[in-house]
Image: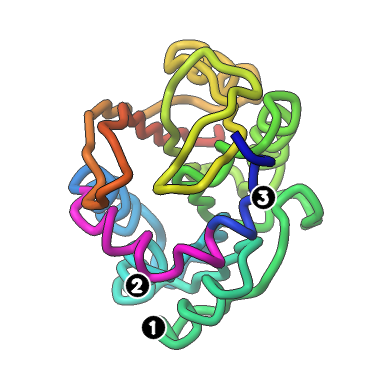
Amino acid sequence: MTRPETAAEVFDALGKDYEHAFRNLAEQRAAITALAGELPAGATVLDLGSGTGRPTADLLTAAGHTVTGYDVAPKMVEIARAQVPAARFEVGDMRELSFEAATWDAITAFFSTLQLPRADQETMLGRFAGWLKPGGLLVFATVPADVDGVDIVFMGHPVRASSFAADVLAGKLRAAGLEIVREEQALFVPDHAEAGPEPHVYLTARKPS
């Protein structure tokens, strides 16, 4: 296997192919729709790993919320700016971002931590909790697995992936001070010749008021 590609390399190469392959994620759309309905009018949302802007920023801006998205892949940010002009998108690594405590009404992170080492993932969960306003919501999705730095091929690209089992992840969110209010698990097959079935977990967690 060749050198694992960075997230920026993978998603710059995939571009709209990623959106196409994952366009039928019903559970993701359901989680976003539920979030949009629970937020106060004109809520501020931070979308980490914003990709092409669809479906997350697209659905949330359509519901009247203000979305700021960050992605490490410049090509994804370019596509998102064209597709969802109502939102703001910037190139950035979530690990390098800094916000005041209690800045955001909601934070979304759909499958955007899988190429981070476990230690970084755990650090980010704590930061998410700190960045949320009291009563704010985190919607987090990943491929649940007890793996740390495993080399795999994702849609034809060599990557190094890390994750946690679903119950361990839920425990880490609670340890960060969040209350889990919704959990959904599903098996999804991306629409791509070089992609196989993926287990998914969607967790919505609230910061106590």
Residue at disc 2, secondary structure: helix
Q: Name the residue under label 2.
A: 58
In the image, the segment drawn in magenta is 11-25
User: Which amino acid, mark 3?
Assistant: Thr
Residue shown at 63%/17% (left/top)?
A: 175
Residue 129 % position (x, y) = 64, 37
**Badge 2, how many Cα within 10 Å: few under 14, some, many 20+?**
some
Residue 83 got which mark? Answer: 1
Image position of 127 (left or right of 25): right
Task: Say whether residue 76 is magenta.
Answer: no
**Badge 1, how many Cα within 10 Å: few under 14, some, many 20+?**
some
Mark earlier in primary sequence (3, 2): 3
Residue placed most toward the observer, 72 or 193: 193
Residue 192, above or below 40: above
Residue shown at 59%/43% (left/top)?
A: 134
User: Which quarter of the rendering shows the N terminus?
Assistant: top right
In the picture, residue 167 is in which quadrant?
A: top left
**Badge 3, how many Cα within 10 Å: few under 14, some, many 20+?**
some
User: Which amino acid, mark 2?
Assistant: Asp
Which numbered disc, 3 or 1, marks the residue closer to the eye?
Answer: 3
Most common secondary structure along the magenta stretch: helix
Image position of 188 (left or right of 145): left
Residue shown at 56%/17% (left/top)?
A: 147
Mark earlier in primary sequence (3, 1): 3
Residue 17 got which mark? Answer: none
Residue 88 % position (x, y) = 56, 79
Cβ–Cβ under 8 Å for marks 2 and 1: yes
User: Which quarter of the rendering shows the C terminus?
Assistant: top right
Q: Mark 3 points at which residue?
A: 6
| Separation of residues labelled 3 and 1 (CA atoms) | 24 Å
